[in-house]
Image: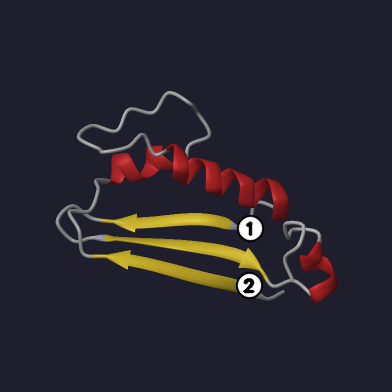
Amino acid sequence: EETVVIEVEDNGPGMSEEIVEQLLKPTRDVSVPKAKGSGIGFRNVHQRIQLTFGSAYGLTIRSEPDNGTVVRICLPVLEEEDARKYRKEGER
């Protein structure tokens, strides 16, 4: 089975292990101290990918304080016919 892996890396302030663990938890009450956001975007994308393609896919986050963050997005490779059902109307 083939997988598409997209990695996005930054050299920002990074996050502690506790914050990284909380970001992908399926719970709504996540408190991320000193964060600019709630992390709901990470959870939303991760859960949508897993609901659509299964638990083998989704986001993983590696981060260390003062060392930046790497977010890895894993998606299945789809045949053209299978990919059509995920496109918006009018897209090729």
Q: Are marks 1 and 2 in contact (CB under 8 Å)?
A: yes
Q: Compared to 23, does 31 lie above or below?
A: above
Q: How is the image coloured?
A: secondary structure
For disc 2, the marked residue is 3
Q: Residue at the location (30% across, 39% down)?
A: 18
SS category of the residue bearing label 2: strand
Determine the residue located farthest toward the left in the rendered image.
66
Q: Position of residue 57 (x, y in %)?
A: 61, 58
Q: Position of residue 72 (x, y in %)?
A: 45, 63
For disc 1, the marked residue is 56
SS category of the residue bearing label 1: loop
Where, by quadrant of the figure, is residue 40 drawn?
top left
- Horizontal side, residue 51 vs residue 60: left or right: right
Q: Residue at the location (77% across, 57% down)?
A: 89
Mark 2 or mark 1, which is nearer the start of the sequence?
A: 2
- Kind of residue indicated by mark 1: Ala
Q: Compared to 56, does 50 lie above or below?
A: above
Query: Residue 90 versus residue 8: which sits nearer the camera?
Result: 90
Exactly how many numbered labels are in the figure?
2
Q: Position of residue 83 (x, y in %)?
A: 77, 67
Which corner quadrant holds the C terminus?
bottom right
